[in-house]
Amino acid sequence: MKSKDKLLYVSAAVLAAGSVAGVKTTTVKAAEVKQANVNANSKLDLNKAEKQAVAQDKTAQGQIKQDTASVQKTQDQVKQDQAAKTQAETAKTEAQNTLPAKQEAVNTAQTNLDNAKQDLTQAQAENKDLHTQYDTTAENAVHTAQDAEKKLDQKVNDLTGQVKTAQNKQNDLLNQRTSAESEIKTNTETLNNVNEQLNKAQTEAAQAQKHFDAVQKDYAPTQNEYDVKKSAAEKAASDLKQNEDDLAQSQKQLADLQTKNNDLAKTVNDTQSQLDNANKDLANAKTDLSQSQAKLNDVQKQSNDVNGKLSQAIVKRDQAKSALDSQSENVQKIIITPEYNKTFNKWYNIHNPKHISWNTKELKDKMTKEMQSVSAVERSMNKYQYNAKDASRSINVRNLTNDEQIEVNKFGINLINQVRSQIGKKPMILTTGSMAFANDVAKGYEKHDDLNSIVTHDMKSLYTTAKKYGLGINTWTESSFHTVNLIKSMNDLKQLIYEGISNMMFSTYEWDHAAGITSLSFDDISMDKSIMPTYTGISFATDNHNNIIMLIDYVKDDQHTYQSFANLNMANRVENIKVDHDKFNVKDVIPTDNLDNSQAGQVYAAAQNEVNTLQGQKNSLDEQIKSLTDHITQSQNRVNDLTKTINDLSTKLANAKTEQGTVQGQISQVSKHVDDLKAAQPALVQARDNTAKALADYEQTHATVLNDYNNAKSQLEQANNKLQSATKAKDEAEKVLNQNKAKLANINQELAAVKAQLADLTTKLSDAKSSQTSAKANLEKAQADYDNYVNTHKDLIDSIAKSDKELADKEEAVRVAQAAYDKASQEYEVAKKEADKLADKVKNLDQSIAKSQENIKSLNNRIASNTQIIEHNKQVHAEAAKLATRKAFDAQINKALDNVVYGTKTISQHTAKAATVKPVVSTKNTKHALPQTGANDKLSLFAALAGLSLSSIGLGSLVSDKKRRRN
C-alpha cells in the first residue's frame, strides 16, 4: 500500500467509528459490557494469582534464608566432624600401634612377678625352719621382766606426781583459811560500827519528827492561801511560756513552709523543663527508630539475596571439591580450616581488604596469639599417613635418581598447591628448569662441611645459581627446613616433606615461611593485574654429619612488567625482574597430578573464590544487621525509657503542683495563728507579773512561819535519809559476814578431805617403790639368762638375721614386680580402651557426616525448589505488570469512546449517511480491510477505535499480506 493508501486507511477508520457510533449505540454498549466482564474476570484471577505469588515469595525467601543458614551451619559441622575424624583416625592408629609393645610389657612383667613369688616362697620356708630351731623362752622372760619394771616405774612416777599435787592443794587451802578468818574479823568490827551509827540515826530522826510536828501546827492556817497564790503564779508563768513556745514553733513552721513553697515552685519549673526536653528527645528517638528499621529491612533484603547466592555457591564449591578429590590419586592431604584461612589472610595477605600491618608490639603479640591458636588446631588435624608401599622402597637421599627427584617434587608441590587452592591462590608450577635450579642450589649448600654452620640460607649459592639460570634478584625466594638425616625409604622422605611444609604453615612462633608458600608475603600480581606464574622446585642438601636441609625454591615470572620496563629502556629494573627462558626452562612442565593444569582444580578455585567473596559480603551484611539490630534495640529501649521518664515526670509535676497548693493553704493558716499568738502575749506577761507580785507579798508577810516550816521539813527529810542509809549499811555488813563464815566452813571441809587423800597416796607410793625394787632384780636375772643363751647359740642367731634380711629383700622384689605388672596391665587396658573409644568415635563421626550430608542435600533441594517457585512467580509478576499496563490502555480507550459517542450526537443525518454509503475503503475487497469491516456489519465502536489506534502508531501499513500478519 502506498502512502496515500495509509492516509485513506486512517480516514476510513475514523469515519467507520463515527458512523457506527451514531447508528448502533445500543449494540456497541452491549458488546463493551460483555468484553468488560471477560476482562474483569481475567484481572481478578491474575490479581489473586499475584497475591498468592507475593505470599509464596515471602514464604520461599524466608525458608531459603533459614535453609541457607542451616546449610552453612551443617557444612561447618561437617568440616569439624571431618577434621575430628581425621584426628581420631590418626590417634586410633597411633593407639593401636602401641598395643603389641604394651602386651609384651605385660607378659614380661607377669614372668618377672612369677619368678619373684617363687623365690619368696623358698625364702619363707628356709626362714621358718631357722626360726623353729630358736628357743624364745629366755628372750620372752626378758620382755616380761622389762614390761613389769616399766609398769612399776610408771606407777611410782604417777603416785609421786599425785602426792605432790595433793600437798600443793593442802597448802593452798591453808592459805585460804587464814585469809577467810582475817576477813571475818574485819567484817565483825565493821558491823559493830554500823550498829552504833544506826542507833544514833534513830535518835536524831525521832527528834526531827517531834520538831516538825510542833512547827506544822503554826503553819496550817496559812498553808491553803499560800498554795492558792503559788499555784496561780506558777500557772501564769506556765501559760506565758507555753505561748512563747507556740509562737517560736509556729514562726519556725511558717519559715519552713515558705522555704518548701519556694522549693516546690522550683521543682515545678525544673520538671516542666525536663518534661519538654524528654518529649523532644522521644520524637527524635522515634524518628531514628523508624529510619533504622527501614535501613535494616533494606540490609536484610540484601542479606537474603546474598545468602541464597552463597548457598548455591557452596553447593557449587562442594561439588567442585568432590570432583577434584575424585581425580586426585594422592592420599596425603593438608586441610585448611576457614578459621585459619581468615586469620592468616588478615595478618599476611597484603591484598586482603582486612589486612592488618602488625608494626607495633601490641599488634605483633595479638597476631602471634591468634595464629598460635588456629595453628594448634591445624597441627592436630594434619598428620602424615604411613604408606607401606613407599616404606618398602629404599632410597639414598644423597643420590636420588631422576625419577625419584620428579616423584618427590610432584609430591611436595602437590601438597603446596593443596594449601594454595584452599587459601585462594593459583597453583605453583613444576618444570625441568625449576627442579634443576633447586638441585643446583642444594649443591652449593653441600659445599659446606657442616650444614649447621648455615644459620639461615646460603645466599652465595642462591646468587650464583640464579645468575647461572638468568634470574634477576627480585624473581626468586626460598624456604628451608633443617632436620637430622634419618631417611631410609621413600616413605621417610615424603614424611619429611609433609612435616616440613606442615611446620612452615602451622608454626608455633613464625609464619613467614607460610606466607612464602602461599605467595602472600611477596607480590605475585603483575602490572596488568594478572597473576604471574610461580615455578617451584624442591631439593635436599646433606652433609657427613647426618644433617639434611629441604629447600623449596620459588621463581616468579613477570613477563608483562619485564617487557614494559624493557620498552622504557629501564635497564636496572629490567635485570632485577628478568627470567631468561633460554637459561631457565619453563616450557617442559611436569604435571603434578593436582590443581596446576587441572580444569577441576580451576573450577574449584573459582568456586572457592566466589564462596569467599559472598562469605565476605555475608559477614559484612551480618555485621550491619547486628549493628542495626543492636541500634534498634537501643533505640527502642531509649523510646521505652523516655516514655517512662515522661510518665514519671508528668506524675511528678502534677504531684508538685498539688503539694504546692496544699503548702500555700498551710502558710495562710499558720500566718493567722502567729498573729493570734503575738496578740495574746502582752496579757499573759501582765498576768504573770501580777501573780508573782501577789505571791511575793504574801511570802514577805508570813516569812517567819514559812521559813520555820521549810527548815523543819528539811531537817526531818535529812534525818530520815540518814536513818535509811544506816539501816542499809547494817544489812550489807551482816550479809558479807555470813558469806565469809560459809566460805570458811567449806575450806575446812575440803582441807580435811585433802589430808585424808594425801595419807592414802603416801601409803600407795611406799608399796609401789618396794615392788619396783623387786622388778629390777627379776629383770637383771632374766637378762643374764638371755645373754648366756645368746653366747651359746651365736651361729643360729646370725643365720636367722641373714635369713630375715634375705626374706625382706625377696618381699620387696615381689612388691616391685607386682607394681610393674599392675602398671603394665593398666597401661595396656588404658591404651586398648582408648583405641576402642577412638574406633567408636570414628564410626560415630562417619554416621554424623553421612547424616549431615543427607541433610545438606535435602536442604539444597528445598532451596532449589523454593528458588524455582520464586523464578516461576516472576512470570506471574510480569503478567500482572502487563495487566496493569493493559488496564491503563483500556481506560484511555474508554475515555476516547466516550468522546466519540458524545461527538456524533451533533453530526447531521446527511453527513452520517454519506459516510455510510460512500466508505473510502471498499467492502468488496476484504483482503486489506479493517478487521471489523465486512458484509455482516458486526463492526463495534471499540474495534473501530482499536484500529484507529494501531494505524496511528504505524502498525496499519498493509504493504502485503505477509507484512500484515507479522505485525
Image (tube, rainbow, N blue to C red):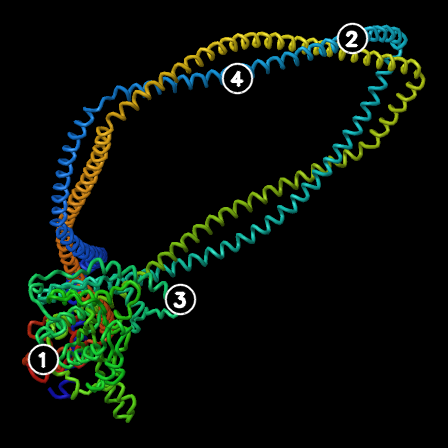
Label 1 or label 4, whichever lies nearer to me, is 4
Mark 3 and mark 2 lie on one chain; the one further toward the N terminus is 2
Q: Which percent across, then down, holds residue 343? A: 29, 64
Do labels 1 and 4 touch, CB within 8 Å?
no
Label 3 or label 4, whichever lies nearer to me, is 4
As helix, strand or loop, the secondary structure at mark 1 comes to: helix
Do labels 2 and 1 touch, CB within 8 Å?
no
Q: Which percent across, then down, holds residue 127? A: 18, 30
Do labels 3 and 2 touch, CB within 8 Å?
no
Using residue 501 as the reference point, say whether residue 164 is left or right of it.
right
**Image-quadrant location for residue 506:** bottom left
Mark 1 and mark 3 lie on one chain; the one further toward the N terminus is 3
Q: Name the residue under label 2.
A: 198
Using residue 184 as the reference point, say whether residue 333 is left or right of it.
left
Label 1 or label 3, whichever lies nearer to me, is 3
CA gap, disc 1 and disc 4: 149 Å
Give the amino acid type for the residue marked by disc 2 in the picture.
Leu
* Residue 932 makes an appearance in the image: no
The quarter in which the C terminus is drawn is bottom left
